[in-house]
Every structure is written in C-alpha cells, then in structure tokens.
Amino acid sequence: MMLLIRLFEEALEEMFSRGLLHGTMHLSIGQEATAAGACLALEKEDLITSTHRGHGHCLGKGAEPYKMFAELLGREDGYCRGRGGSMHIADLSNGNLGANGIVAGSLTISVGAALSFQMQKKDNIVLCFFGDGAVNEGSFHEALNLASLWNLPVLFLCENNQYGMSMSSEKSVAGESIASRGSSYGIDSIQIDGNDVETVYESVASYKNEILSKGGPKFIEAVTYRYRGHSKSDRNLYRTSDEIEYWKEEKDPIKRYIGKLLESGISEEELRDIESSVKNEIRNAVKQSLDSPLSPVTNLEEDTYA
C-alpha cells in the first residue's frame, strides 16, 4: 500500500509536468506510512475524513487507482465524475467522506459523523486526518472540545509533516507538542513516529479498541515529513537540501519497512514481485484513465444542488 501511494503520486507528478493535469495538487510523498498504517487498522464501515493532501488516505481506504486518476483528469469515470479533482475526492462506498480544500475542515466533519455513529449506536469509529497547519485554526479547538464533551467515537490523527505551507511548525505551534493540545481537552493523546508503518497501525488499532470499549475520542500526533513542496506552485526554498536528504535516506517509511522485511526473512525476489505488480497496476490505471471519456460540458451543473 505504501508503494502504491508513492507510485500513484509520482505518476501524477509526471502527468502534471507533461501538461496532462491542470490546477494544483498536494503530494504526500514521504508520508505514506501514516495513511497506509492507519487505514489498515480500520474496517470498511469505519469512516475517514481527509485533507487537501489526501491521495494516500483515499487509496489506503480502498479506492481504485483508475477511478482516482480519472477524477484528477476530469473524466466521467472518476469518483466525483471528474468534478472534484485532487482536493475533493470522496469515496463513500469505502467509507471516505472526502478530502477538502479547507484547512481543518476535516475536523468538524468528523465530529458530525461521529455524533451520527453515537446516535445510531454503531460499533464504528471516525478517523480524522489533518495536518499540523490545522491545529491553529478555530475549527480544531471547536471539534476537540465537542468531541470530548460528548464522548464521541472519533480518533484524531495529526500528520505532522513539520511545515504548514512554508512555515515550520516549530515557529507556529506553541506548547510542548501538538499531542499536548489533545490532552488539554481531556483526550488521551500520544506522539508517535509517523514514518514507522507498524507503529502507526498498532497505535490506531489500540486506540480504536479503546474507543469502542470505553467510548470517547483519542488523539495521535504522527511525526512525518513531505519531500515535495506544499503544492505544485511551491518552489520549496524554505528548507535545506540537507534536511530533505536526511529524511529520504534515514527516515523514509518504505525503505525502513523493506529493511524490516528483509531481516524477517522475506526474500528480495518477493519484494521485487510486489514492486512489479504495483508498477503494472499504476501503469494500467494511467493508460485506462487517459483513454476514458471526459466529463461532458453539457451537464457540468448536474448534482450541484440537492
């Protein structure tokens, strides 16, 4: 899954550079462990809310690469019939309530969905993805406050990639840590290595079990890193190349997990087979999406209003 997310986004980069994709997009290359590990701990009936950097979340929750490529290319076969694009993919069939372009927008949506679960007495949780840039927004504090007051089944997962736009979180977030903000609302909160996929999985699975058995929200700060700029228009000049290379060489989630697999006895041949299979899946999905029909201009306003 981590490899699928990375190759999916690298394919998007190439398509963007060739002029096949328009607008902008926010890549999560380097952060794959948080999406893959967290979504692996969920059932299909559990819900997620996503962010403007949400391709990995969508794939992790079961989305098909073809339909995602089709969406970004404005094709009729896309998840939102080509109308949502990169920042607004939703896949209700797999429990993804959608990405959105509003910083901290996922938090209030997750609280509403969790309240719905509570009222229906369902044994499921809502996993809310958001970034470090969201923790200074009013919606963040409103969401945590209500979730704690109402004992809602929501797991808040902050993907702290350490930069909101071009601003280091060290310069913009007061307090001991982002996790401590969860604690201030009476929510059990931990900080974890967001580039260790097993740690992410185990932390989410453990907190999910606690939410279902005891009730109430939980909070995880997963420390990770994005290799690319904030968006395709970001020239990424506020970081040193040494910092980026350090994370690529020492902290890369895929490279680290491959090392663990080799140590556990998985053969290099098995890993090459996995890589070959994922590459073929991405290659075929790209070709199929480029050959698929564009969303017709004549019905662009369909589904705009209820």
Image (cartoon, rainbow, N blue to C red):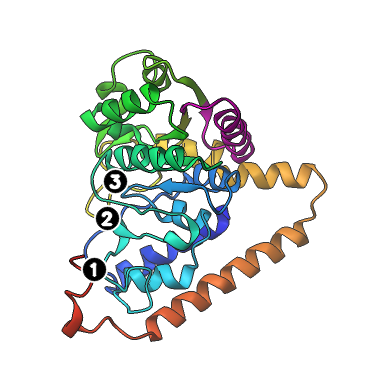
Q: Amino acid at mark 3?
A: His
Residue at 32 percent of width and 78 percent of height: 75
Q: Position of residue 78 (x, y in %)?
A: 37, 73
Q: Position of residue 100 (x, y in %)?
A: 28, 51
Q: Residue furthest front?
A: 120
User: Tag on residue 22?
Assistant: 1
| Label 3 residue SS | loop
In contact (CB < 8 Å): disc 2 and disc 1: no
Q: Nearer the viewer, mark 2 or mark 1?
A: 1
Quarter occupied by the C terminus: bottom left
| Label 1 residue SS | loop
Q: Amino acid at mark 2?
A: Lys
Q: Which residues are magenta?
A: 192-219
Q: Quadrant of residue 135?
A: top left
- Whether the magenta-drawn stretch holds residue 214 is answered as yes
Mark found first going from the N terminus, 3 or 1: 1
Q: Which residue is mark 2?
A: 232
Q: Position of residue 270 (x, y in %)?
A: 76, 60
Residue at 46 percent of width and 36 percent of height: 224
Q: Which residue is mark 3?
A: 230
Residue at 16 percent of width and 74 percent of height: 301
Q: Position of residue 266 (x, y in %)?
A: 79, 51
| Residue 97 drawn above or below residue 72 | above
- Find the distance from the CA under tag 2 to the CA under tag 1: 10 Å
Q: Amino acid at mark 1?
A: His
- Find the distance from the CA under tag 3 to the CA under tag 1: 16 Å
Residue at 38 percent of width and 48 percent of height: 50
